Image (cartoon, helix red, strand yellow):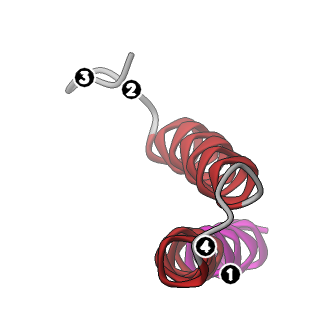
Amino acid sequence: MIDKTTDPVEAIKIAIKREHEAYEFYKNHADLFENEATKEMFMFLAEEEKKHEEKLQAELDENIHYEM
């Protein structure tokens, strides 16, 4: 859980994990449907979560280098 006492780096790591879990959720659900529009919707959502994960990872990488 993230609260006001959480270290910012740890908060980003938690967020990355949650984005990855959301990506997997949407990707796995896309595979469950035969309807092409439904598959596309879930894959779109999966890709959005992947973008969020990548942005957070970039932020984390930037902060680690900044603090060193």
Residue 49 within the segment the image draws in magenta = no
State the count of labels.
4
Residue positioned most to the front: 34
Instruction: Select label 2 or label 4 by which is in front.
Output: 4
Q: CB of mark 3 within 8 Å of CB of mark 2? A: yes
Choose the circle earlier in sequence order: 1 or 2.
Answer: 2
Residue picked out by circle 3: 3
Q: Residue at x 68, y 81 (%)?
A: 58
Q: Quadrant of the C terminus?
A: bottom right
**Res. 6 mark:** 2
* Residue at mark 1: 58
Residue 48 percent coordinates (x, y): 51, 80
C-alpha distance separating marks 3 and 1: 22 Å
Q: Give the dominant element type of the magenta stretch: helix, strand or loop.
A: helix
* Circle 1 SS class: helix
Neighbour tally class for label 2: few under 14, some 14-19, many 20 plus, Cα within 10 Å: few
